[in-house]
Image: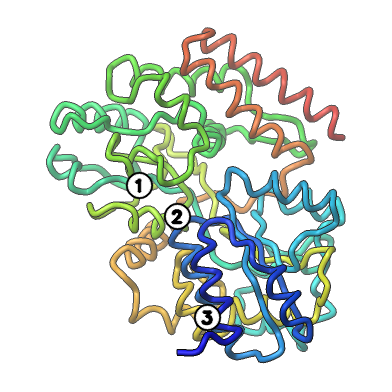
């Protein structure tokens, strides 16, 4: 078999693994091609599928060569910030709903409106998904899947412990009971420790009837609510249902491969629903999906939002080709068949219909989870204010003090509330 250009690029993609670095090779060796770079945060399963999608697009579009670059989520935005400063972002970049508005404000993302009906086809996309990508009346982002918070649990361990619960209506009291019963029956810790998990925390604030950010953009979590949240996890840790604090402190914002449910250390981890497929591919036991635990009042705390967007960067070298690739990424039947539900529930109705008969067991679990949470989530919140990303990072850093027993939950809670307001004042 001869090693033609596209086979070479595909081989390079496979060899590059989590840090694809072959765009320069493509550009220098085949300068006549229109070269497009796509940068995303990934995991092994997502990377495999995305590189295959790139291969399909390149085969279908002679003269355009898309190359892929990927990093773990922990390093993605740090690299992107460096690229923004160096004005060398990839043409197509992955974005999250919570941070997208900051990048639009910084001028790092370009609107797509001029390409609609030409290189960009949004005729089959859900209006809710299109609306989520619009800011100030302009379309900046294409949804590549709907998403929500999910508790992922090991069904074998739950069965061995005889656990029964309502996955769409359980409470933190249920979590305490279940974690203790799993630990007693199997010897495996019942849950990851959510002390420094900002997504769990943000749901808890809303479940308490407050807003993480007020309409004025102020940090809405009081020190009392933060302390109450820390106390839940501290109680379970003290009872021995969770890993020791020092262990959990080393796993804050860890890659999927290090999550407790993947390493076998715990029976339950917390994630975004589009990560279900990636987690299932790393373990043999069948996974189950539940909403985040709630308070007894059952006030909704989770939202359904686009899992990720694909956006056109300010530094694109060929916007027409890049938008054509982005359009194919959400519409092309061969490409979307490979992507499946790994990034979430597709926003294109034709794509969903085509995927339904071919769903894997974990993808069917994901669809059933989405069916189950309908009517139990909050409305999509307004965009977070400037500084929200810095506040999230601060929370994860400061909350570690609770895990390491370096301060009382009240003192750490007060510090977080104080620092969050300081960040907001600087960001106005």
Whether residue 344 is visible to the viewer of this picture, yes or no, is no
Whether tag 3 and tag 2 are in contact, CB under 8 A, the answer is no
**Residue at label 3?**
335
Q: Position of residue 353 (x, y in %)?
A: 44, 82
Badge 1 crowding class, 10 Å Cα cut-off, few under 14, some 14 to 19, many 20 or more, is many
**Residue 152: numbered disc:** 1
CA separation, marks 3 and 1? 27 Å
Q: Residue at x 45, y 54 (%)?
A: 275
- The answer to which of 155 and 226 lies nearer the viewer is 155
Q: Residue at x 33, y 33 (%)?
A: 191
Q: Position of residue 340 (x, y in %)?
A: 45, 72
> In the rendered view, does 214 fall on the left or right side of 399?
right
Nearer to us: label 3 or label 1: 3
Badge 3 crowding class, 10 Å Cα cut-off, few under 14, some 14 to 19, many 20 or more, is many
The relative height of residue 238 versus residue 105 in the rendered view (above or below) is above
- Secondary structure beneath label 1: strand
- Secondary structure beneath label 2: helix
Nearer to us: label 1 or label 2: 2
**Residue 119: numbered disc:** none
The relative height of residue 301 versus residue 351 in the rendered view (above or below) is above
- The answer to which of 333 and 212 lies nearer the viewer is 333
Q: Looking at the image, how many numbered discs can be counted on the residues?
A: 3
Q: Quadrant of the N terminus?
A: bottom left
Q: Position of residue 222 (x, y in %)?
A: 63, 21
> In the rendered view, does 372 fall on the left or right side of 239?
right
CA separation, marks 1 and 2? 10 Å
CA separation, marks 3 and 2? 19 Å
Whether tag 1 and tag 2 are in contact, CB under 8 A, the answer is yes
**Residue 275: numbered disc:** 2
């Amino acid at each position: 078999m001869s090693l033609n250009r596209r086979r070479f690029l595909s081989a390079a993609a496979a060899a590059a693994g989590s840090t694809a670095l072959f765009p320069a090779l493509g550009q220098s060796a085949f300068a006549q091609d229109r070269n497009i770079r796509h940068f995303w945060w990934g995991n092994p399963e997502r990377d495999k599928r995305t590189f295959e999608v790139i291969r399909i697009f390149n085969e279908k579009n002679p003269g355009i060569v898309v190359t892929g670059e990927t990093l773990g989520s922990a390093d993605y935005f740090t690299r992107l910030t460096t690229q923004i400063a160096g004005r060398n972002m990839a043409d197509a970049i992955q974005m999250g709903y919570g941070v997208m508005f900051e990048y639009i404000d910084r001028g790092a993302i370009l609107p797509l409106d001029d390409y609609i009906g030409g290189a960009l086809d949004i005729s089959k996309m859900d209006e809710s998904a299109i609306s989520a990508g619009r800011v100030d009346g302009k379309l900046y982002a294409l949804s590549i899947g709907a998403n929500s918070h999910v508790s992922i649990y090991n069904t074998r361990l739950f069965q061995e412990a005889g656990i029964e619960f309502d996955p769409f209506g359980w409470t933190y009291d249920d979590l305490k009971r279940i974690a203790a019963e799993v630990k007693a029956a199997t010897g495996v810790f019942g849950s990851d420790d959510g002390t420094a998990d900002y997504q769990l925390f943000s749901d808890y604030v809303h479940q308490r009837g407050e807003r993480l950010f007020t309409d004025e953009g102020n940090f809405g979590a009081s020190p009392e609510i933060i302390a109450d949240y820390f106390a839940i996890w501290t109680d379970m840790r003290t009872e021995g249902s969770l890993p020791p604090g020092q262990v959990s402190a080393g796993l804050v914002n860890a890659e999927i491969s290090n999550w407790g449910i993947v390493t076998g250390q715990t029976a339950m981890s917390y994630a975004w629903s589009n990560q279900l497929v990636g987690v299932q591919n790393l373990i043999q036991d069948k996974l189950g999906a539940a909403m985040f635990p709630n308070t007894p009042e059952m006030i909704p705390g989770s939202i359904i939002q686009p899992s990720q967007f694909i956006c056109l960067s300010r530094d694109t070298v060929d916007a027409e080709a890049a938008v054509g690739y982005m359009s194919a990424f959400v519409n092309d039947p061969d490409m979307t068949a490979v992507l499946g539900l790994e990034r979430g529930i597709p926003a294109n109705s034709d794509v969903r219909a085509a995927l339904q008969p071919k769903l894997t067991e974990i993808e069917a679990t994901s669809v059933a989870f989405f069916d189950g949470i309908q009517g139990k989530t909050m409305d999509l919140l307004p965009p977070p204010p400037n500084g929200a990303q810095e506040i999230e990072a601060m929370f994860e850093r400061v909350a570690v003090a609770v895990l390491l027993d370096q301060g009382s939950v009240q003192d750490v809670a007060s510090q977080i509330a104080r620092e969050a307001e300081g960040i907001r004042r600087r960001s106005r």
